[in-house]
Image (cartoon, grey):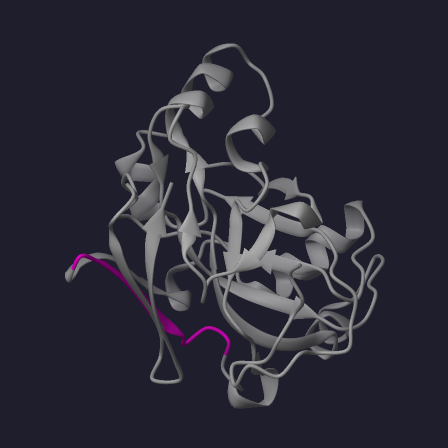
Amino acid sequence: MYQHSDYLGNVLPMPVGKVVCIGRNYLDHIDEMNSAVPTSPLLFLKPKAALCSMHAPLVVPTDQGECHNELEIAILLDKPLTKASESDARAAIWGVGLGLDLTLREVQKTLKNQGQPWERAKSFDNSSPVSGFVPASEFPALQDIHFSLHINGELRQRGHSALMLHKIIPLIAHMSAFFSLDAGDVILTGTPKGVGPLVPGDKVRASLEKIIEINTQVVG
């Protein structure tokens, strides 16, 4: 069963909560998907059953069309937030890590065309693998974080938090204005361009600055 941990593998004594996500937070990803720029943050949720460890093999569905990678900066909260100020939002961050928003792309396209929510495409069990988390004190500048994803040795995604349309601290405060956030919740902050299919046998390397590097593989 998944438990939050730090980047050294130590289990963190906090509950496992929900995952709160933002879509379309990088212009290059919006362009690659031929999507419109939202007028306000595009939010959606994943249940705690979506969380799993990115350090273990990545389990992807193989019977519902392509399952795409969406690598993102993940934020772990250790304090509850309701209608929070930006200073309160900053103080509630325990740590920073990586997360994958695994997406059943063909399912999502069908749902979009029917005007339906995305949960069937994004909120299935194990759809949100996350890394261990680095204490927030190691990231005094949240808007200067680089991350990348390689698949089978080839660069697929490269991101920089400075390019987010909605920056991390204001985004968390905005989320808390609409629904309460809890200790143990994870915030996924959006993906840059480079989404694509993952298939069993793929070798995956994900990096956050020079602090986290994960090497794993995809299984069915």
Q: Please count the marks in the image.
A: 0
Find residue 180 and report its horizontal and vertical position in percent: 83, 53
Furthest residue toward top? 114
Q: Position of residue 147 (x, y in %)?
A: 34, 69
Question: Horizontally, is 90 left or right of 140 in the view?
Answer: right
Looking at the rendering, in which quadrant would you find the N terminus? bottom right
Left or right: 171 with respect to 53?
right
Tell me if 158 is positioned left or right of 47 in this view.
left
Camera-nearest residue between 40 and 189: 189
- Which residue is at a point 44% across and 37% down the rendered structure image? 103
Q: Is residue 217 magenta?
A: no
Q: Residue furthest bottom?
A: 137
- Say whether residue 32 is left or right of residue 24: left
Q: Quadrant of the C terminus?
A: top left
Q: Where is 122 relative to 93, above or below? A: above
Task: Find the magenta span and give its range.
Answer: 142-152
User: What residue is at 53 percent from the left and 50 percent from the top?
Assistant: 128
Q: Position of residue 66 (x, y in %)?
A: 33, 30
- Residue at (53% x, 86% y) in the render: 140
View extreme (left): residue: 154
